[in-house]
Image (spheres, helix red, strand yellow):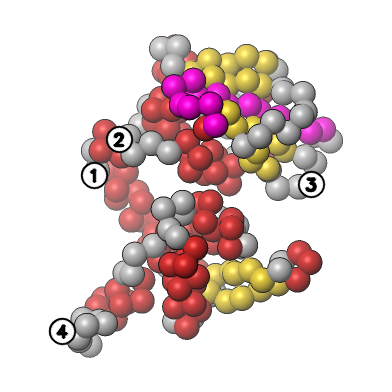
Amino acid sequence: MSSDGYDSFCPVAKACEIIEPRWTLLILCELSHGATRFNEIRRGVPGISPTLLSKRLKEMEHHGLVRRIKCDAGEPGYATTPMADELKPVVQALGKWAHRNIDKEVSLNKLDARLLMWNVRQKIDTCAFPRGTTTVIQFTYPELIESERHYWLVARPGQPVDLCLLDPGHDVDLFIRADLKAMTSAWMGWSTLRSEIDANSIVLIGDRKLIATLDT
């Protein structure tokens, strides 16, 4: 076998040579969830160094998985290509397989509040929020150190949801105080929000309509 591949004509082997290098599929996941800028991708893949991320993006561009685009103010960004988009069902199936077959306790030993909140920020459904107003939800994880304890999701009309690590200075509509393991478990579907709330692992204070629609 060669040092940079499987030395095989097998289609699966050739595909692995492109998508198998570490972080490649996670980078594709971030791009498919709407990340475009370099730092946005890093926030969703926090374990990768800037140098390695730059290298992977160049490799992925070379293999036709990503293309460069212009973001606001001419800042360079990245987007998936049609070739990469064909991989979405494969990646989704891989995630579902892992959800079914990997022990949840193994996953819950790798807690990361920032990664969790970034994931929530990407997938939150703003249609459940009051229209025409700014909605702010503050998450607090009491067991963490002060610098990693508080997070604010700020949803402004017609704009992407912001994730703030410092108090943005807005009135908070909903306070969520949670055990990080409980929130991660509920978010991943290993438990339910209702069961964690009943167990007092997640406490909600604030707007009743937001609380009532929290599941959606």
Relative height, residue 142 to residue 84 (above, below): above
* Foreground label between 2 and 3: 2
Residue 200 x %, y %: 45, 12
Determine the CA span between mark 1 and mark 3. Answer: 39 Å
Which amino acid type is marked by label 3? Gly
Q: Residue at x 75, y 71 (%)?
A: 74
Whether residue 61 is visible to the viewer of this picture, yes or no, is yes
Does 216 sit left or right of 8 as displayed? right
Residue 45 x %, y %: 46, 54
On the image, numbered disc 3 is attached to which residue? 158
**Of the numbered discs in the image, which one, if any, rests on residue 101?**
1
Is the C-beta separation of discs 2 and 4 under 8 Å?
no
Relative height, residue 19 to residue 44 (above, below): below
Determine the CA span between mark 4 and mark 3. Answer: 53 Å
Magenta span covers which residues? 133-147
On the image, numbered disc 2 is attached to which residue? 109
Determine the CA span between mark 2 and mark 4. Answer: 36 Å
Is the C-beta separation of discs 1 and 4 under 8 Å?
no
Pick whichever of labels 2 and 4 is earlier in the sequence.
4
Determine the CA span between mark 1 and mark 4. Answer: 31 Å
Determine whether the residue tagged by mark 3 lies in a helix, strand or loop. Answer: loop
Which amino acid type is marked by label 4? Met
Query: Can you tell which quarter of the image residue 4 is in?
Result: bottom left
Relative height, residue 4 to residue 213 (above, below): below
Determine whether the residue tagged by mark 4 lies in a helix, strand or loop. Answer: loop
Foreground residue among 93 and 136: 136
In the rendered image, residue 139 lying in the magenta stretch gets the answer: yes
* Foreground label between 4 and 3: 4
Q: Residues within 10 Å of mark 3 (few under 14, many from 20)?
A: few
Q: Residues within 10 Å of mark 2 (few under 14, many from 20)?
A: few
